[in-house]
Amino acid sequence: MTRKKICVLTVLGLLVPSVFAQEADAISGADTSWLLVSTALVLLMTPALAFFYGGLVRSKNALNTMMMSFVALGISGTLWAVAGYSLAFGVGGDWIGDFSMAFLAGVGLEPSGTTPHLLFMGFQGTFAIITAALISGALVERMKFVSYVIFIGLWGLAVYAPVCHWVWGGGWLGGMGALDFAGGAVVHVNAGVAALVAARVLGPRKDYGREALLPHNVPFVLLGAGILWFGWFGFNGGSALAADGIAALALVNTLLAPAAGIFAWTLLDRFTTGKITAVGIATAIVVGLVAITPAAGFVSPGGALALGAVGVIPSYYLIRWRTRTSFDDSLDVFAAHGMGGIMGALLTGVLATTAINAGGANGLLFGGGVTQLGIQALSVLAVAVYSGVLTYLILKLVGLVTKLRADSSDEGLGMDIVAHGEEAYATGEGAVLLNEAEAPERVNGLTKKD
């Protein structure tokens, strides 16, 4: 080995340890460990959502419904890395980022706060995935699977990424002081309004209003709700981006708000219908989780209890009202996520306190006046209008390329066998029906052509 090569290697040997030493000084092992766990927990929420939604539909559509969540892992996850992350967190203006980090250019192990930049990207990617998957609950049992795939891909780039930029990426709502700790507006109002518009564009299911469209597997619903609650500790707690007191506060509030939501929902069920249903309890868990999401690091535990109990009331009555109308938001995505997110965002403007989080602002009850409440209301309105308009345009665009909705006969057969050639439960009946539907019409053993 020449002396020149030895000198070069010696210099590199001196430089590399110094680089890593600098990273070690900036990156916290505790914070990184917590964000690693939180990223895994949030990712688990999408399969949990698949079980929650899958149990709520009829058995002939269970697999298709669950696939709508699982395919979001691939479509939304990939597009987040390709362009979504850059559009959300890239250097840009008030409205959207740029393409400076497209294909994760420049996104490596350098610090982003006290954790690696790459890990922050991954954590945020799990949010993009589940937000797209949430919308599927309004589309189940009637939307063509390929059309859904195209829709969520476009929606993630054109709707989710810009809204994320507005609040968390240096955009205008964040600059105005909007409080959204873990995604009340960015995730739930955004997805809830998109679901509302999509359900209206698609129209009601073939049998809606003519027969009872009952959940085929309520234990699945309870399992999904339970795992969602578990994953939500990472969703809210991880949004502190550090293993600190704010993360602990967010985690405890994520325990308390859904608990209070169950308590309130149980009373509402008992005195309204006389029955306390399992689907109702599962829904209460989800609505309580949604409601605390924007407030998790900004309110006290007492505030979380109040928020959870109050936050579920509009959702409860909205679901009861919706079932008596012709509007088919199949799994009540807007009532649970849209309305829950709206209530959470607004109540953050009432209950937030700097005594808990100095990085936030005081709400109405803690001397902040109506200013913060007004900012929260503006953030909800802005996200709702943008999401609603863009969702409508994207669906119309997709409809120009391919049909949005399955044929009536396919709806009758069930989307499992039509879209996937599989059945959630291997009875073989779906395949037989499909073969009969596709076979030429026969008279006395001869086709009409014969």
Image (cartoon, helix red, strand yellow):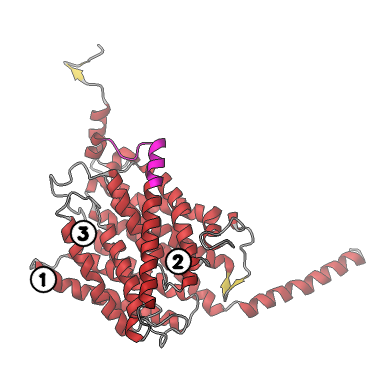
Q: Callout 3: helix, strand or loop?
A: helix
From mark 1 to mark 2, how far is it between C-alphas? 37 Å
Q: Is residue 374 left or right of residue 57?
A: right
Residue 376 sits above or below residue 47 on the image? below
The picture places residue 407, in percent across and down from the top left corner, at 27, 35
Residue 181 sits above or below residue 399 on the image? below
From mark 3 to mark 2, how far is it between C-alphas? 26 Å
Image quadrant in which you'd find residue 383: bottom left
- Residue located beneath label 3 in the image: 218
Q: Callout 2: helix, strand or loop?
A: helix
Mark 3: amino acid = Val
- Residue located beneath label 2 in the image: 40
Task: Tell me if mark 2 has few (under 14), some (14-19) or many (20+) residues whose alpha carbon lies within 10 angstroms of its own.
Answer: some
Mark 2: amino acid = Ala
The picture places residue 398, in percent across and down from the top left corner, at 40, 41
Magenta-drawn stretch, dominant element (helix, strand or loop): helix
Q: Is residue 79 left or right of residue 221?
A: right
Instruction: Indicate yes or no whether the magenta region holds residue 207.
Output: no
Which residue is at 25% across, 21% downward?
Answer: 440
Q: Is residue 313 visible?
A: yes
Which circle's residue, 1 or 3, is located before the other in the chain? 3
Rendered image: mark on residue 270 = 1
Mark 1: amino acid = Arg
State which region is magenta: 393-407
**Which residue occupies the foreground of this view, 285 or 370?**
370
The picture places residue 423, in percent across and down from the top left corner, at 28, 44
Image quadrant in which you'd find residue 53: bottom left
Which circle's residue, 1 or 2, is located before the other in the chain? 2
